[in-house]
Image (spheres, grey):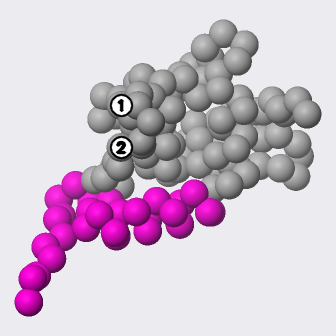
Amino acid sequence: MTTPLPTAIKLHKASKTLELQYAPDEIYHLSAEFLRVHSPSAEVQGHGKPILQFGKIGVGLTKVEPAGQYALKLTFDDGHDSGLFTWEYLYQLARRYDALWDDYLAELKAAGKTRDPNESVVKLML
C-alpha cells in the first residue's frame, strides 16, 4: 500500500500545531511538543533505544520545509532541526497520535520526568 501524501500542510504558530490534511474529512493536528518528542533524529531515537525527551511542553515550530519529494524538515524553537519526517512516518504519527501520546505520558511518569522544563519530580524513599 502506498502512503498517502498530505493535500495541505499548515503551520499554526499560535497554537503550536502542524495541520496535515489528507482528504476533506481526514485532517490531523499534531502538536509541536508531540512532533519534537517523536522526532526521527538520532538524538531522539538513539541507536537502538529511543532517548526519552522531557521538558518540551512549550516548544514550538519555527519552520516547515520540504526535503525533496519524500519528507518534511521541521525546525523547532529549542534549536532542534535534525531528522527528516518522511511522509510515511508523519502519517503513522497522525493516525496513532492518541496511543503514542498516552505511551509517552506513561514513559515520562515511569521515569519520574515531566513535560514542564521548570519542574522536576522528586521521589521520596520512605
Mark 1 lies on residue? 43
Question: Relative to residue 40, is residue 35 depicted above or below?
Answer: below
41 shown above or below 70: below
Q: Amino acid at mark 2?
A: Ile
Measuring 73% from the left and 52% from the top, which residue is drawn there?
Answer: 95
Q: Choose between 12 and 57: the one closer to the eye.
A: 57
Residue depicted at 34% across the width and 70% down the height: 109
- Tag 1: amino acid: Glu
Picture quadrant of residue 107: bottom left
Report how far apart the C-alphas of labels 2 and 1 lie in the structure: 7 Å
Work out whether residue 17 can be spotted: yes
Which of the marked residues, 2 or 1, is nearer the chain's N terminus?
A: 1
Mark carried by residue 80: none
Local SS, label 1:
helix
Relative horizontal placement of residue 102, taking residue 87 as reference (left or right): left
Give how far across and how far down residue 90 sits, in percent. Answer: 66, 37
Q: Are marks 2 and 1 in contact (CB under 8 Å)?
A: yes
Q: Which residues are magenta?
A: 98-126
Left or right placement of residue 56 versus residue 63 in this view: left
Quarter residue 50 falls in = top left
Q: Position of residue 35 (x, y in %)?
A: 51, 43
- Residue plotted at (72% across, 32% down): 88
